[in-house]
Image (spheres, rainbow, N blue to C red):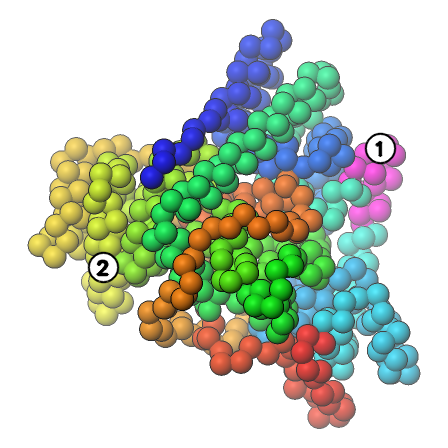
Amino acid sequence: MRKLLSYTSSLVLLLFLLLTSGQAQDDKALLAELVAADEEAVNALVLYPEETRMAILEVSLYPEALIKLEHIQSQTKTRFQELLAQYPQATQEVIWDLTRYPNLIAKLAAATPENSKDWKQLLADYPEVIHQRAKEAYLNHWDELKVIDALDTEARLAFDDLLVTYSTSTQESLRHLLPLPEVLSILTENIRLTVLVGALYRREPDWLLTQVDSLNLVVARQNAQELEDWKASLEEDPTAMKELTSSAESFRAEYNYDDDYYDYTTQDDLYYQDRAEDRVMHDYYFYHFPYWFGYPEWYYYPRWRLYPSWYDWGFYWGANRTVVVIGLPSFYFTHWYFYSPRHHYRWSHLSAHFARHYDAHPRNGSSITTGVRVWQHQNREVVSREWLRDDGGLSNRFREYGKFEADRVKYNRTHPQKQVTQRQYIESNSRRYPTIAKEATRRKATNPTIVRPPKGEKTKPRVPLQTNPRKIETPKRTSKVRPPKQKTTVRKVPRKVPPIKQGNERHRSLSERMKSTRTPKVQSRKPKVQTPKTRTIKPKPTTKKVKPRKGNG
């Protein structure tokens, strides 16, 4: 394989600018330290367009406003989620989805039985695909919709009261950021960084703006270069491409939350069998969950917006079943991939391919680099950087690891009172896993210092807060996916990239990275023979039942 290109880290450049600017004051040195600790947060913020970056800097002048805003959100979110907790997840999904559409719940809550009969007029401003869910919620949960509307109104009034104490420019900046919950979350979660940036921006705005603009260019180029390297590596390794597409199909079968109700394809353009026009995501994917309510708890990481499966894969199927790469696999995908031992056994060549990409881009905060680094740390008793070295046997080692870890998990499941660690299990079964045993022995002998994960990469899993959730079943293992009849290659087909700003995507990546170390609580769904585009909630006995529309309606 061609040696992947390397490039200067954005962190190194920013530190250099901060410490050699000729104005290396104490605050600037401290800012450099915070950037080193929160590099991914900084990269996320600087990738937004200039208007948003200016709003971020303006708001950073008043960090107390962010703290008050977070307090309003915390109270509203708690009450909202307590309200939904009494219902099964199927009902929660319907209501959560409605919250994404501006003023939709307010319209439903204000509707009377008389004007609700004219659904076409009532829902004229919203995509047709959401109409059925709106009708279901109105008929079955109108009282709850009224409470939710009251919560939203209360939060907005509190927000308006908060704004009156600030200047017009600050008010406009806060209003600009409210539809970007990812930004507000980053600013409040990294409040020390926000405070220091605000202090520097107040004293030396020109200097700070220069640094931000410079970093914006560096990060954008860095991401573009890594994507080009990823595309090239797949072109040169058909086996890795084959295993990536196979794993993507399994991913979609297990995690179909966003594709279950919303279908981005139609019968005639599926896999581009009849035409080669560009396929784009429909507008309903871009509505976000409101800042006041947070995001659904069945996602094990912050997911403020819906995305179709192919967006998490990093590619889509083009004409003649060719693969068109549009990005790196998402953090959601890499987390799913790395934390299931059977994936490393089944697709060991792809695992090695991920590790080689990590070795070429060790300092990047991308999904693959973070996935490999954190996975290695959590398996440090049997996996080291030396173990990940590409010496021709890496694929075989991943395959052995997959068998080893799957067997250990099975043992712990059948012996709940005698669960063992990786090192304990390998000491009792060293002959079955020779390369794992060799590495464990070497690690034990050298007794290396264990380095904690980078800030934000927690290892303790979060248990979703659900009441009466629907029963979750792990899909049965299906037969081996047959490769497509035609050779799978990467084709550079022009495509209309979904209009999502780069900063928004980087925030999505950061949010996923911060949660990517959690041991996954798999909430997969059993593959269905037919995937319904809508769900109908059983109405109350006294309410007339509405027949669901066919298709996406």
Q: Residue furthest left?
A: 431
Q: Position of residue 66 (x, y in %)?
A: 70, 39
Does 233 lie within the magenta span?
Answer: no
Residue 191: name its quadrant: top right
Crowd around label 2: few <14 · some 14–19 · many ≥20 (10 Å): some
What secondary structure is the magenta-colored segment mainly? helix
- Which quadrant of the figure contains the C terminus? bottom right
Query: Residue 433: horizontal and vertical position, in percent?
Result: 14, 53
State yes or no: discs 2 and 1 in contact (Cβ < 8 Å). Answer: no
Alpha carbon of mark 2 to alpha carbon of mark 1: how far?
59 Å
Q: Nearer the viewer, residue 208 or 72?
A: 208
- Expressed as whole percent of the image width and height from the top left, the position of residue 410 reads 25, 66
* Residue 403: image tag: 2
The boundaries of the magenta stretch are 158-174
Identify the element where label 1 is drawn: helix
Residue visible at 79% across and 66% down in the picture: 126
Q: Vertically, is 423 above or below 122? A: above
Q: Amino acid at mark 1?
A: Ser
Residue 202: x and y in percent read 74, 20
Quick one: quadrant of the N terminus? Answer: top left
Classify 10 Å Cα crowding around label 1: few (below 14), some (14-19), many (20 and above). Answer: few
Circle 1 is placed at which residue position? 169
Q: Kindly identify the amino acid type of the residue bearing the numbered disc 2.
A: Lys
